[in-house]
Each structure stands twice: as structure tokens, then as C-alpha cells.
Amino acid sequence: MRRFYSSALVSAFFLTGNFVALPVNSAEIETQPSGLSLVVTSSNTAGGGLNLYRMESGGSVTLLQEDIFPDTDLTSFVPGEQIIDAASGTILLKEPTSNRYRKYNLQTNSFDGWVNINGTTDDDNAKMITIPFGIKEVINKKCTSSNGSSCDSSSNDYITLGDEGSGEFAKID
């Protein structure tokens, strides 16, 4: 079959003087949401509230969600009190007037409920801190080094998957 296809292609070229348009496979696309940043600003509607936007690198914005805290009429927002879970694509947006966080799923552009802080000595003033994501436990770029601090000039970089050492389960050269 392969030989027939090649022969047909060569014949089509000589008969028409052009290559015949062949079907093209689908293009590869990014599956991760992209954008420079998320933006929160007050709504211009009568009820007030805060809206969530995605800002692109050129400065244009796209509305993602209206009234992110529907139980309030807030028109101001405190940046820096959000928790980003990079592994799951979730952002916890702190409601400024309470001890609860609204879970926003960036992948599905939807809210997935609330998380309340309960059981501390001062729940109303407790703040969450993001736990760092150990990217080297998932993927790591490496090279060969004779001095332990820089890549050898003859070394090719490679990628490892999994944790370092015995936890490494794949190497892509």
C-alpha cells in the first residue's frame, strides 16, 4: 500500500506539474489555559460585586466570571490573599469579609464550592499560605557534569520524569 501511494504521488506530480494537496493532520495545540494574569475588578452593575477576568499579554481582558462573591456586595479586593494550587489548576479566592475561600477551577472556568478555615485560635483572621509545589518531583532538566556545578561542554541536556534518584522512572534524552 505504501509503494502504491508513493507511486501515485509521483505520477500526479509528473502529470500535473504540481504536488497534489494531501490531507493534513490536525495541528498540535496547548491544553493549558494561558494568559498573563487574572484580574479582579468591581462590577458596574447596580448590585455591585467583583468580576474575574483573564488578561492577555497585550492588555486585553476576557470576562471569566461575574460576581465572584455572590453573598456580598463587595466592590474592593485584597490581592495577595489568594492561594494558587498549580498542580490542580485551582485558585482559592479569599472573601475579604470572612474566613472562607471560594474555589475557582481554572481548567473548567467554574467555581467548585467554598473552603472555610475552622479550628484555629482566631478563624476570622487566619490566613492560608500556599504550599510550594515540588516540580522536580515531577519533571527535571539535567545534564552531565564533571565538576558538580556546570554542564560539561560535550554534555546534552536531558529530561527525567519522577522524583530524583530511585524515584526517577523515565529519562528522555
Image (tube, rainbow, N blue to C red):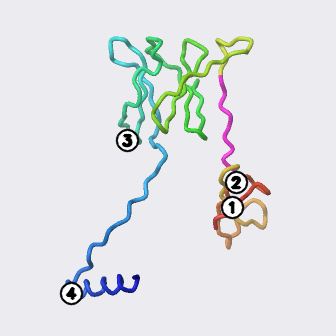
Kindly report the distance in space between the C-alpha atoms of the residues bearing marks 3 and 1: 38 Å
Q: In this view, does 123 lie above or below 3?
A: above
Identify the main secondary structure in magenta: loop
Q: Horizontal and vertical percent for residue 98? A: 58, 13
Q: Which residue is drawn at 33% across and 17% down?
A: 44
According to the picture, the residue beneath numbered tag 4 turns out to be 15
Which residue occupies the foreground of this view, 130 or 13? 13
First reached walking from the N terminus: tag 4 or tag 1: 4
Disc 3 marks a residue whose amino acid type is: Gly
First reached walking from the N terminus: tag 3 or tag 1: 3
Kindly report the distance in space between the C-alpha atoms of the residues bearing marks 4 and 3: 49 Å
Kindly report the distance in space between the C-alpha atoms of the residues bearing marks 4 and 2: 54 Å
Q: What element carries label 2?
A: strand
First reached walking from the N terminus: tag 2 or tag 1: 2
According to the picture, the residue beneath numbered tag 3 turns out to be 58
> Would you say residue 132 sits in the magenta stretch?
yes
Q: In the figure, is residue 121 to the left or right of 51?
A: right
Q: Is residue 117 above or below residue 91?
A: above
Q: Is mark 1 on a helix, strand or loop?
A: strand
Q: Horizontal and vertical percent for residue 170? A: 68, 61
Q: In which quarter of the image is residue 97?
A: top right
Q: In this view, does 172 lie above or below 91?
A: below
| Dot label at residue 112 | none
Q: Horizontal and vertical percent for residue 141? A: 65, 58
According to the picture, the residue beneath numbered tag 1 turns out to be 170
Kindly report the distance in space between the C-alpha atoms of the residues bearing marks 2 and 1: 7 Å
Q: Is mark 3 on a helix, strand or loop?
A: loop
Q: Residue at x 45, y 34 (%)?
A: 109
According to the picture, the residue beneath numbered tag 2 turns out to be 162
Closest to the camera, between mark 4 and mark 3, is 4
Q: Do the CB atoms of the residues marked 2 and 1 lie less than 8 Å apart?
A: yes
Closest to the camera, between mark 4 and mark 2, is 4
